[in-house]
């Protein structure tokens, strides 16, 4: 492949069709501007967003994840977080917590505001302060 020029016709070719309806393949692509995908995108490997400041990913509509999510930095949620199933948290700071059942295997829970709790299990002689 590669770029070639035909002297007799004046046509430049790059080894594949690149019209707006063709399926085009590039080995590496650097884009200096906005990428606007007006349809779905299928990323078969890791998507890395390496913006140095501000929002690296801004989801403006509902999102669904078929696999797990790992958050490796401080994060905040500006609305309601509904969780079904078991959830493991090593540190949780919240203004309001509503739970039908709270199970603590090892740690201290201190709640000072708006506590609605139907049952709680605290193991290993730790403290539950309400």
Image: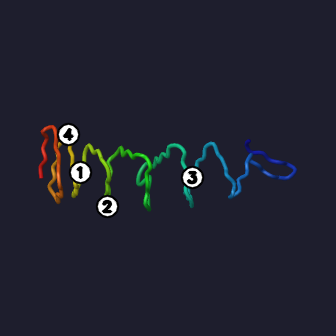
Asked if the residue at tag 2 contacts the one at tag 1, i.e. Cβ–Cβ closer than 8 Å, the answer is no
Label 1 to label 2: alpha-carbon separation? 14 Å
For the residues bearing labels 1 and 4, Cβ distance under 8 angstroms: no
Q: Secondary structure at mark 2?
A: loop
- Disc 4 residue crowd, few under 14, some 14–19, many 20+, Cα 10 Å: few
N-terminal of the pair, mark 3 or mark 4, is 3
Q: CA distance from mark 1 to mark 4?
A: 16 Å
The mark closer to the camera, 4 or 2, is 4
**Image coords of residue 71 (percent x, y):** 36, 46
Q: Which residue is mark 1?
A: 93
Any mark on residue 32, and which? 3
Choose mark 1 or mark 4, whichever is in front. 4
Which residue is tagged 4? 106
Q: Considering the numbered disc 1 on the image, is that residue within a helix, a strand or a loop?
A: loop
Q: Earlier in the sequence, mark 3 or mark 2?
A: 3
N-term-proximal mark, 1 vs 2: 2
Q: Which mark is residue 117?
A: none
Q: Are marks 4 and 2 in contact (CB under 8 Å)?
A: no
Viewer-proximal residue, 51 or 43? Answer: 43
Labels 3, 4: front one: 4
Q: Is residue 62 left or right of residue 98?
A: right
- The percent coordinates of residue 125 (x first, y second) are 12, 39
């Amino acid at each position: 492949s590669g770029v070639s020029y035909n002297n007799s016709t004046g046509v430049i070719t790059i080894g594949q069709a690149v019209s707006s309806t063709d399926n085009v393949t590039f080995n590496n692509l650097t884009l200096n501007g906005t990428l606007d995908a007006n349809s779905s995108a299928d990323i078969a490997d890791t998507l890395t967003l390496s913006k140095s400041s501000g929002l690296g990913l801004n989801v403006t509509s509902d999102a669904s994840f078929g696999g797990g999510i790992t958050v490796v930095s401080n994060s905040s949620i500006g609305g309601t977080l509904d969780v079904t199933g078991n959830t493991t948290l090593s540190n949780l700071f919240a203004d309001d917590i509503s739970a039908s059942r709270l199970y603590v295997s090892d740690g201290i829970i201190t709640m000072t505001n708006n506590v609605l709790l139907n049952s709680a299990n605290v193991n290993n002689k730790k403290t539950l302060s309400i």
